[in-house]
């Protein structure tokens, strides 16, 4: 029997859950299908909001400081319409402790989380692909494809968009299954011709055949998101990105293309975030369009809420103290009685985090509807705003905001 929550998935959501459990004095064990030394390509999720940074600060001493120190805060942001700038805002430098966000590639964030987790006494089972999930009266049994198995009072399923745990439990994803295609490319910095450390959005970029293009700086490079048209072949655009990317960069820019990929971004939310004593978190529970950075940030909010729910069962008398928090992995052991309190805590988690996911999906949907501009009135409104921006700064500011949608999870004090 695992003393403490069993966490399936060693991505940023699972690792955050493990660290937050340790911060509560609970042991945590993580099961991950990849080997311990597996390298993940690409920048992936790069934007960590202040709320997420504060959560990491609560998870382990010094962790947030390292993330902020290694991350990048933009020097400003700009928006263009068909090559003409309609909005520009420079950001005043801020002390590191007051950073409103940082941009840091997800693989580096995961490395920092994993190193911190090992020091905090989190234990791991690597190269262990969860395959079977059995709900027992007061625990959960997880079995891997190689025969290893673990039994725990609670399981946090943070095993990503294709979550095996979710599928084995028969939990459906409700939402848009069509997807919207984007090509994503990472470009390393060119010290001789550095790009501005500004987030830049282009509506109808004239050197991208009128496609929308987003350029986001992060520590070490820039990410370029190309919004595909219906007749595009995303795989072909990702396979040879230099053909369309180089015209978007300054002449002579020699930054290396370090990664390219293409995605169908879906909008979907699990029909329930809990089953028995299993709590879904992150992309195992919800999928959002990327603009607005809701995926990773809401996933870490899920992790915090999941650990709060598990710890609240302990506050009801279902956790017996075993030892003070220490680097040897000791902590408190979760007992397996008191199903009523456990079910109440999980029902609260499901209600609050699923409602937040629905609001996040709606917000991401507004951003996606603006970007695709399928309806004539949306295209007309955007054109009118671009014309008005010549004399009305707020029209340009509106065009700058709209591709990212509102941030409001419907929870006091939480954007995600």
Image (spheres, helix red, strand yellow):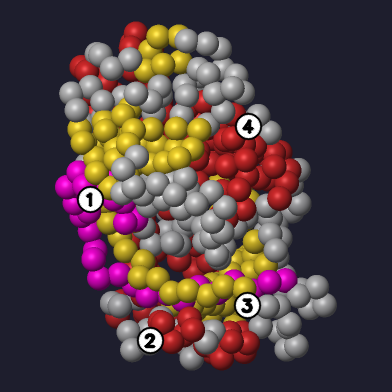
C-alpha separation, residue under disc 2 versus residue under disc 3: 20 Å
> Considering depth in this image, is 140 or 12 the residue closer to the camera?
140
C-beta proximity under 8 Å, tags 1 and 2? no
Disc 1, SS: helix
> Considering depth in this image, is 354 or 122 the residue closer to the camera?
122
C-beta proximity under 8 Å, tags 2 and 3? no
Disc 2, SS: loop
Across and down, in percent, residue 327 comes to 61, 23
C-alpha separation, residue under disc 1 versus residue under disc 3: 36 Å
Compare marks 2 and 3 and give the one earlier in the sequence.
Answer: 2
Q: Is residue 110 above or below residue 314?
A: below
Residue under numbered circle 2 = 233
Q: Give the numbered dot on residue 247.
A: none
Q: Give the numbered dot on residue 257.
A: 3
Compare marks 1 and 2 and give the one earlier in the sequence.
Answer: 1
C-alpha separation, residue under disc 2 versus residue under disc 4: 45 Å
Q: Residue at position x 37%, y 75% from top? A: 181
Compare marks 1 and 3 and give the one earlier in the sequence.
Answer: 1
Please indicate whether residue 47 sits to the left or right of residue 155 in the image. right
Residue 87 sits in quarter: bottom right
How crowded pointer 4 is (Cα within 10 Å; few <14, some 14-19, many 20+) is rated as some
How crowded pointer 2 is (Cα within 10 Å; few <14, some 14-19, many 20+) is rated as few
Q: Residue at position x 23%, y 22% from top? A: 138
How crowded pointer 1 is (Cα within 10 Å; few <14, some 14-19, many 20+) is rated as some
Across and down, in percent, residue 304 comes to 44, 33
C-beta proximity under 8 Å, tags 1 and 3? no
**Which is in the foreground here, disc 1 or disc 3?**
1
C-alpha separation, residue under disc 4 versus residue under disc 1: 33 Å
Q: Residue at position x 56%, y 12% from top? A: 324
Segment tinted magenta in the rendering: 161-189
Residue under numbered circle 1 = 167
Question: Do we see residue 284 in this rendering?
Answer: no
């Amino acid at each position: 029997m695992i003393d403490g929550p069993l966490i399936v998935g060693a991505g940023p959501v699972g690792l955050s859950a493990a660290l937050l459990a340790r911060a509560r004095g609970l042991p945590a064990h993580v099961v991950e299908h990849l080997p311990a030394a597996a390298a993940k390509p690409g920048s992936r999720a790069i934007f960590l909001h202040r709320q997420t940074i504060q959560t990491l600060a609560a998870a382990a001493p010094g962790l947030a400081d390292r993330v902020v120190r290694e991350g990048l805060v933009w020097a400003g942001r700009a928006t263009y319409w068909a090559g003409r700038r309609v909005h520009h805002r420079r950001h005043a430098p801020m002390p590191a402790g007051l950073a409103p966000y940082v941009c840091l590639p997800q693989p580096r964030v995961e490395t920092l989380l994993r190193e911190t987790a090992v020091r905090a006494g989190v234990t791991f089972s690597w190269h262990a692909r969860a395959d079977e999930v059995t709900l027992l009266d007061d625990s959960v049994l997880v079995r891997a494809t190689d025969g290893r198995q673990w039994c725990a009072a609670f399981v946090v399923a943070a095993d990503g968009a294709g979550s095996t745990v979710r599928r084995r439990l028969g939990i459906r994803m409700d939402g848009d299954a069509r997807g919207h295609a984007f090509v994503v490319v990472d470009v390393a910095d060119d010290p001789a011709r550095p790009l501005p450390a500004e987030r830049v959005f282009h509506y109808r970029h004239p050197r991208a055949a009128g496609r929308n293009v987003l350029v986001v700086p992060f520590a070490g490079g820039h990410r370029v998101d190309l919004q595909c048209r219906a007749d595009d072949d995303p795989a072909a655009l990702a396979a040879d990105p230099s053909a369309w990317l180089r015209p978007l960069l300054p002449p002579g820019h020699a930054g290396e293309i370090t990664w390219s990929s293409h995605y169908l971004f879906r909008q979907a939310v699990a029909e329930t975030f809990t089953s028995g004593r299993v709590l879904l978190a992150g992309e195992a529970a919800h999928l959002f369009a990327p603009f607005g950075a809701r995926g990773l940030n809401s996933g870490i909010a899920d992790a915090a809420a999941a650990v709060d729910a598990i710890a609240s069962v302990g506050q009801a008398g279902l956790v017996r103290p075993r030892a003070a928090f220490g680097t040897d992995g000791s902590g408190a052991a979760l007992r397996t009685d008191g199903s009523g309190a456990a079910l109440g805590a999980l029902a609260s988690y499901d209600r609050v985090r699923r409602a937040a996911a629905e609001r996040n999906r709606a917000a991401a949907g507004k951003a996606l509807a603006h970007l695709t501009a399928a309806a004539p009135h949306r295209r007309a409104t955007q054109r009118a705003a671009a014309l008005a921006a010549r004399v009305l700064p707020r029209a340009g500011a509106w065009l700058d905001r709209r591709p990212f949608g509102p941030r409001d999870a419907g929870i006091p004090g939480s954007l995600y």
